[in-house]
Amino acid sequence: MEAVFDVEASAALSDVQKRRVVARAGPVLRAVAQDERSQARNRELATERLVAALRAALRVERRRVPTKPSEASRERRLDEKRKRGELKKLRRELD
């Protein structure tokens, strides 16, 4: 069973949503299901997959807010580097 959704012809989506879906998934969404022996169950599965694909295409990604490392995290990193250097120094051969 195959479920097809024409994004351009849809009255349920706004123009902004249509542009977002077309940019991410194309102008026509298709979902195929041949998992079950029952045609009705395959139709349900295809519809569910189509809805999931449409939701994924409509999802708006949140912008990452750039942050700086905290003073404590910088200090921990430098302290770990010092400890690592000391450990390596102890492994060297003595003159």
Image (spheres, grey):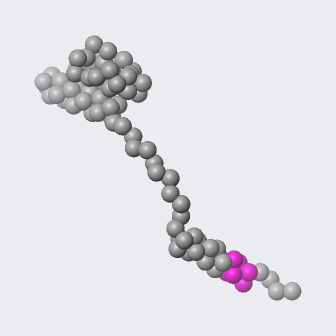
| Along the line of sight, the residue nearer the viewer: 62 or 6 | 62
Q: Quick one: which residue is furthest to the right in this view?
A: 95
Which region shows up in magenta?
84-91
Horizontal relation, residue 51 to residue 26: left or right = left
The quadrant holding residue 58 is top left
Quarter-of-image position of residue 20:
top left
Q: Residue at x 69, y 77 (%)?
A: 85
The percent coordinates of residue 46 (x first, y second) are 23, 26
Quadrant holding the N terminus: top left
What x and y, as percent, mark residue 35?
A: 23, 30
Left or right relative to 15: residue 39 = left
Q: Position of residue 72 (x, y in %)?
A: 52, 74
In-image side of 17 versus 42 (left or right) = right
Give the dominant element type of the magenta stretch: helix, strand or loop.
helix
Q: Is residue 70 above or below residue 65?
A: below
Q: Residue at x 32, y 21 (%)?
A: 15
Q: Is residue 37 visible?
A: no
Given residues 51 and 11, the one toward you in this image is 11
Q: Position of residue 42 (x, y in %)?
A: 19, 26
User: Which residue is at the far bottom?
Assistant: 94
Q: Residue at x 62, y 73 (%)?
A: 78
Quadrant assignment, res 45? top left
Please indicate, yes or no, whether residue 6 appears anywhere in the rendered image.
yes
Total numbered labels placed on residues in the image: 0
The residue located at (26%, 27%) in the rendering is: 50
Q: Is residue 87 magenta?
A: yes
Q: Is residue 34 above or below residue 62?
A: above
Position of the C terminus, as image quadrant, is: bottom right
